[in-house]
Image: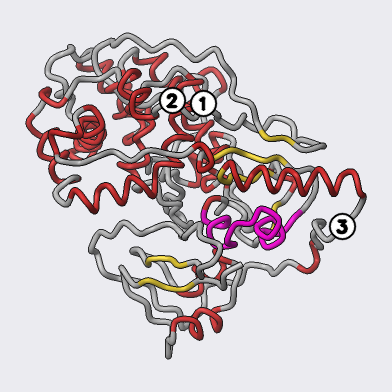
Amino acid sequence: MRHVLRPLPLTLSLLLAACATAPIPQPAPSKAQAPVAVVPDVAAGAPASPQAPAATNVWERLRGSFAMADCAADPAIDVWARRYTRSPKHFEAQMRRVLPRLFYVQESAQRHGVPGEFALLPWVESHFIPVAPRKNRAAGMWQIMPGTARHMGLAVERDYDGRLDVPAATDKVMALLKGYHDHFQDWRLTDYAYNAGRYGIDRLVKRDGTPPAEPAVPTLPVRAGTRQHLVKLMAIACVVREPGRFHVTLPTLEESQQLVTVEVGQRLTLDQAAQHAGLPRAALADLNAAYRNGLIDTRHGARLLLPRQHADRLRTALLAQAVGGPSDLVASVSAQPRLPDLDDDDQPVTSEAEHIPATPTLDASAPPTHVVRRGETLSGLARHYGVKVAQLRHWNHLSDNAIRIGQKLTVGAAN
């Protein structure tokens, strides 16, 4: 999502929408509200953490909630599906890395009554990568522009960026998609609107009429990139529908690795939270990239997203602290570093080659790593992972700040 929504009267803002074509039956919202791991002093208004039985297969649920056309609907769908899976092993590795986030997003989509295809939307936008903010560009795995984020109610500040807050941003995006569909009554136009803007698609529909069910990819005169956005979404859904057709095996997700939220009623540092959760600091920072200075701030919900097994450990520690009184869990705000401006000697990655990096390892016995992607800089990675540029240079035997796409960097010491 790269468009910026313009301020409009309240009556119009309620009509914000996203992409689709002819009316397609809308899946019924799930009645079950997933429980959240909660500690005392829960922040009000935070979105619930998705949870599902371990025996439930995320792929079966996705397929069962799809609402758009299948693989045979358009030749371009098959082209993109085969492009995604041209290296089956690489595709399977990517899916294993993103599956915890995908599972979380699918649960949110189900609660909002949004079809399963849109749980795959971050694959099209960013491959589920929490893209770091850069000036006035889109950020987060949903690729939301700053102005759009503020219109949606997501804070974009120096120390906290709600576009990178997976629970908050996912909840807002799903509500936005549902609103788009309520307006257009077409999930294809919902995707068009998410990519190109609700008002631009609305003007086209008013001029040319609502597109028919066929062809599956509407022929509205939208930009080629907007049409391709829908094709890509239908293509990754095609792979999920028929993985055997593309010689891939979709991974499974253990219950212990399902992502849940733990809400805290106090300020903590990511270092403290990682220690008590038994999770590498880099992995926790990657899942909670919204806290850009390493401090979990109660002004923005004080919510952490982490694997269930580590959430249980953190919750136990927080409950023990609540019973036993103050402990080293409480962070000192004044001790937290401020985010510096971009270093003058920092050298951004300039290669245009696409690369899908691995997320930091969850193995506490190994140093966490990060694979460099386009646009990242050494100082930006230092801020993201709460370390110094000098440490990154030392750990990776670098003589300067130059890094390249695909380079695997050590970004911290093992816990």
Tag 1, which secondary structure? loop
Residue 200: x and y in percent read 32, 29
Q: Are marks 1 and 2 in contact (CB under 8 Å)?
A: yes
Name the magenta segment's main secondary structure: helix
Residue range (magenta): 268-286
Residue 76: x and y in percent read 10, 34
Tag 3, which secondary structure? loop
Judge whether residue 273 is colored magenta. Answer: yes
Point 31% across, 28% down: residue: 191
Placement of 332 over or under 222, stated as above or below:
below
Circle 2 Cα neighbour tier, 10 Å, few/some/many (<14 / 14–19 / ≥20): few
Circle 1 Cα neighbour tier, 10 Å, few/some/many (<14 / 14–19 / ≥20): few
Q: Which mark is residue 53?
A: 1
Q: Are marks 2 and 3 in contact (CB under 8 Å)?
A: no
Residue denoted by label 2: 56
Residue 175: x and y in percent read 50, 25
Res. 211 image quadrant: top left
Tag 2, which secondary structure? loop
Query: How far apart are the alpha carbons under marks 2 and 3?
Result: 39 Å
Foreground pick, 116 / 378: 116
Query: How far apart are the alpha carbons under marks 1 and 3?
Result: 34 Å
Query: How far apart are the alpha carbons under marks 1 and 2?
Result: 6 Å
Amino acid type at image mark 3: Ser
